[in-house]
Image (cartoon, rainbow, N blue to C red):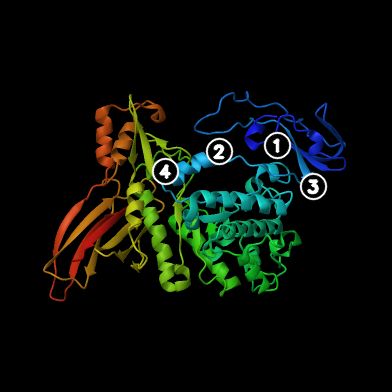
C-alpha cells in the first residue's frame, strides 16, 4: 500500500473483503495487462492467488520508476507512487474511492483565484476504471464509469457553483488518432462511451438543482490531422441524431437502453430518447482541433457543420462547431525563418484574423453556420522562456534577480478581438496575389471596431514587404469630425520581432539566457500595447467619413471609430 490513507483505506484492510474466489481481476502495470480469476485470498499473508495468465514478452514492470515521495509537494498535494504494478477488481467491479486534494488545489487557483473559464474533458476512462488499466481507451464497465463521472462532475458543481454552467463539458479527445487516444479502435464503443459520459454529466447538474438544458455538453475534440475532407464524424453525428437510423452507427442511446441506469439517468436524456424510440444523444457543440493554415483550419469547422446539416438539418441547425485547440502549428519550429511566426512577425495574428474572417464569411452565406463558439489557442504547459520559438501568448524574460512576464502580439490581439460584439459586419475577401485581404467590424455602445488584415499563409517569415491601402466609408455619423484610433500589428508595429532576432543571433542558448535590466526595459517597451495612429477625419454632408487604413502583409489593424 502507498497513498491509501488519502482515500480513507485502512492499512490492515483484509484482502478477502475485496477479492473472492471466482472474481475476475486485472493485472496491470501501466504498459501491460492481463486478466485472471481469483482462486484464494489470504488475509494473514496478504496475498491473492489467481489462475494462470500470460506474461508480457519483456516481463512485468513491477518496480517503481523512482523512489516513493516522503513529503507532500504543497504545489501538487497527494501521495502517488511512480509506476509499479496493480491488482484491480474487474468483474465484479470495485468500489470507487476519491481523493480531491490535488484537483481542488489546482482548480481553486484557476477558477477560484483567477476566475478562468475551465473546459472539463472526460477524454477516456480513468486508468483504474479502464478496460486494460491504461488511459486512451474505454471503461471495463460503463455503468461504473457513469457513476464515477457523475460523482466527479457533482463535486465540481458543488465547489464552483454557477460557474460550472459556463464551462463546455467535453467528452473524448482526438479519438481519430486511435493509436494514441482511442486504442481499442472501436467506433461503436466510442458512441456508447459518449452516451454514458454525457448523461452522467447532465444527471449531476440535475441533482444539484440546475436545468440540464442549459448545460453545454459535447465532443469529440477530433484531431482532424488528415484535412477537412477526411473528418471521422459521420457515424457519431448519425448516432447523436434522434431522427436518423443507419447501419453505419449505433441506433439507440446506450445509456438509455441500459436497465442498470433506470432511475439514474438525466431527465434531459430521458425526454430526448423517450420521444424518439430510444434514439439521440445531447450534442450542444461539436469540437474539432484545427492546426495548419488559416484556410485549412476554418475549412475543417465549416466541413464539420456541413456534414452535420447533411445528416440531420433540423437537429443540427443551431449546432456550434468549435475548436478548443488551435494554432498554426503546435510543434516546435526548427526553421528560424518560419519560427518568426511566434516571435511577433505578424503571421500568427493575421492567421487568427483570417481564420475568424473565413468563418464569418461562411456565416453571411448561410446563417446556420453563424452559430459559432470558442476558438481556443493551444498553449504548452508552462510559459515560453525568453525568445524561444513556441506557441504562446506571453513569454518569460529571465533576469538575474527575477522573472518577468510580458505579452506577445497574440495576447493583445486576442484581448482586442474579445471586445467585439456578435453583430458582425463582414467585408468581402479579396485574394491579392498570395495575400488574403479582408476584415470585419462590430459596434459597441461607444464606438465602431474594425479589423482589417492581410495574410499570406506561405510567408511564415513575413518577408513580403507588401502593404495594402484600404478605404472605408463609415456612415451615420454626427458632428463635423470623427476621431479614429488605430493599433497596427505586424513585424514592425506592436512587435518584439526585431529584438527577438537580435537576441537570438547571439551565441548563448536562448532558453538559458539572462537578460540585463536595460535589455528587459527595451523588450518591455516594445511588448506593451501602443496606439500607432490617432487621426481626425472630417464628416461630410451625407454624415459619413472616408477612412484610410494601410495594412502590412501578414498584418492586422484594429481600428476604433469613436461614435458620439
Between 195 and 452, the one lying in front of the other is 195
Q: Which residue is mark 1?
A: 31
Q: Earlier in the sequence, mark 1 or mark 4?
A: 1
Between the residue at mark 1 and the residue at mark 3, the CA separation in whole angstroms equals: 23 Å
Disc sitting over residue 399 in the figure: none
Q: Above or below — where is 504 with respect to 209?
A: above
Callout in the foreground (2, 3): 2
Separation of residues labelled 4 and 3 (CA atoms): 42 Å
Q: Are marks 1 and 4 in contact (CB under 8 Å)?
A: no
Q: Is residue 526 above or below residue 158?
A: above
Which quadrant: the N terminus? top right
Helix, strand or loop for disc 3: loop
Using a 10 Å C-alpha cutoff, classify the residue at mark 4 as few (fewer than 14 neighbours), some (14 to 19) or many (20 or more).
few
Quadrant of the rendering where the C terminus is positioned: bottom left
Mark 4, residue position = 113
Q: Earlier in the sequence, mark 2 or mark 4?
A: 2
Q: Secondary structure at mark 1?
A: loop
Classify residue 202 as left or right of residue 188. Answer: left
Mark 2 residue element: helix
2 or 1: tag closer to the N-terminus: 1
Residue pointed to by mark 3: 92
**x 67%, y 27%: residue:** 64
Residue under pointer 2: 101
Q: Residue at x 45, y 57 (%)?
A: 374
Q: Height in image: 523 above or below 179?
A: above
Would you say the residues marked 2 and 3 are in contact, meaning their CB atoms lie under 8 Å apart?
Answer: no
Q: Is residue 561 left or right of residue 276?
A: left
Q: Nearer the viewer, residue 10 or 495?
A: 10
Residue at 54 percent of width and 66 percent of height: 213
Amino acid at each position: 500500500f502507498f497513498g491509501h490513507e488519502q482515500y480513507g483505506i485502512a492499512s490492515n484492510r483484509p484482502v478477502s473483503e475485496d477479492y473472492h474466489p471466482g472474481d475476475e481481476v486485472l493485472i496491470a502495470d501501466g504498459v501491460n495487462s492481463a486478466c485472471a480469476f481469483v482462486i484464494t485470498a489470504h488475509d494473514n499473508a496478504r496475498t491473492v492467488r489467481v489462475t494462470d495468465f500470460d506474461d508480457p514478452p519483456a516481463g512485468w514492470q513491477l518496480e517503481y520508476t523512482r523512489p516513493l515521495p516522503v513529503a507532500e509537494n504543497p504545489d501538487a498535494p497527494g501521495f502517488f507512487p511512480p509506476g509499479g504494478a496493480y491488482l484491480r477488481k474487474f468483474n465484479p467491479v470495485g468500489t470507487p474511492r476519491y481523493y480531491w486534494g490535488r484537483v481542488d488545489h489546482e482548480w481553486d487557483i484557476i477558477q477560484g483565484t483567477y476566475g478562468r473559464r475551465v473546459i472539463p474533458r472526460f477524454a477516456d476512462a480513468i486508468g483504474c476504471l479502464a478496460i486494460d488499466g491504461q488511459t486512451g481507451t474505454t471503461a471495463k464497465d460503463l455503468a461504473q464509469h457513469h457513476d464515477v463521472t457523475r460523482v466527479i462532475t457533482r463535486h465540481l458543481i458543488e465547489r464552483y457553483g454557477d460557474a460550472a454552467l459556463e464551462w463546455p463539458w467535453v467528452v473524448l479527445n482526438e479519438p481519430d488518432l486511435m493509436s494514441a487516444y482511442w486504442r481499442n479502435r472501436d467506433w461503436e464503443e466510442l458512441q456508447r462511451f459518449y452516451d454514458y459520459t454525457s448523461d452522467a454529466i447532465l444527471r449531476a447538474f440535475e441533482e444539484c438543482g440546475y436545468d440540464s438544458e442549459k448545460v453545454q455538453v459535447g465532443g469529440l475534440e477530433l484531431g482532424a490531422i488528415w484535412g477537412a475532407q477526411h473528418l471521422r464524424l459521420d457515424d457519431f453525428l448519425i448516432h447523436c441524431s434522434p431522427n436518423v437510423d443507419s447501419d453505419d452507427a449505433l441506433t439507440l442511446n446506450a445509456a438509455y437502453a441500459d436497465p442498470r441506469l433506470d432511475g439514474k439517468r438525466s431527465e434531459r436524456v430521458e425526454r430526448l430518447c423517450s420521444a424518439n424510440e430510444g434514439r439521440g444523444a445531447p450534442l450542444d457543440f461539436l469540437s474539432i482541433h484545427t492546426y495548419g493554415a488559416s484556410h485549412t483550419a476554418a475549412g475543417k469547422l465549416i466541413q464539420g457543420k456541413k456534414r452535420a446539416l447533411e445528416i440531420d438539418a433540423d437537429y443540427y441547425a443551431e449546432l456550434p462547431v468549435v475548436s478548443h485547440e488551435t494554432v498554426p502549428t503546435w510543434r516546435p519550429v526548427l526553421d528560424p525563418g518560419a519560427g518568426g511566426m511566434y516571435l511577433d512577425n505578424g503571421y500568427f495574428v493575421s492567421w487568427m484574423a483570417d481564420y475568424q474572417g473565413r468563418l464569418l464569411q461562411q456565416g453571411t452565406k448561410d446563417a446556420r453556420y453563424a452559430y459559432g463558439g470558442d476558438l481556443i489557442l493551444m498553449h504548452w504547459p508552462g510559459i515560453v522562456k525568453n525568445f524561444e520559438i513556441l506557441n504562446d501568448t506571453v513569454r518569460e524574460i529571465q533576469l538575474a534577480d527575477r522573472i518577468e512576464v510580458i505579452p506577445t502580439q497574440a495576447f493583445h490581439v486576442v484581448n482586442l478581438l474579445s471586445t467585439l460584439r456578435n453583430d458582425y459586419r463582414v467585408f468581402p475577401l479579396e485574394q491579392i496575389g498570395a495575400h488574403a485581404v479582408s476584415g470585419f467590424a462590430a459596434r459597441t455602445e461607444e464606438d465602431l471596431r474594425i479589423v482589417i488584415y492581410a495574410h499570406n499563409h506561405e510567408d511564415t517569415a513575413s518577408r513580403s514587404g507588401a502593404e495594402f491601402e484600404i478605404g472605408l466609408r463609415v456612415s451615420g455619423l454626427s458632428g463635423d469630425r470623427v476621431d479614429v484610433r488605430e493599433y497596427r500589428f505586424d513585424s514592425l508595429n506592436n512587435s518584439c520581432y526585431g529584438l527577438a532576432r537580435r537576441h537570438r543571433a547571439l551565441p548563448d542558448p536562448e532558453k538559458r539566457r539572462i537578460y540585463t535590466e536595460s535589455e528587459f526595459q527595451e523588450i518591455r517597451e516594445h511588448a506593451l500595447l501602443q496606439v500607432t495612429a490617432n487621426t481626425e477625419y472630417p464628416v461630410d454632408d451625407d454624415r459619413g467619413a472616408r477612412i484610410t487604413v494601410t495594412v502590412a502583409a501578414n498584418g492586422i489593424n484594429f481600428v476604433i471609430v469613436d461614435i458620439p
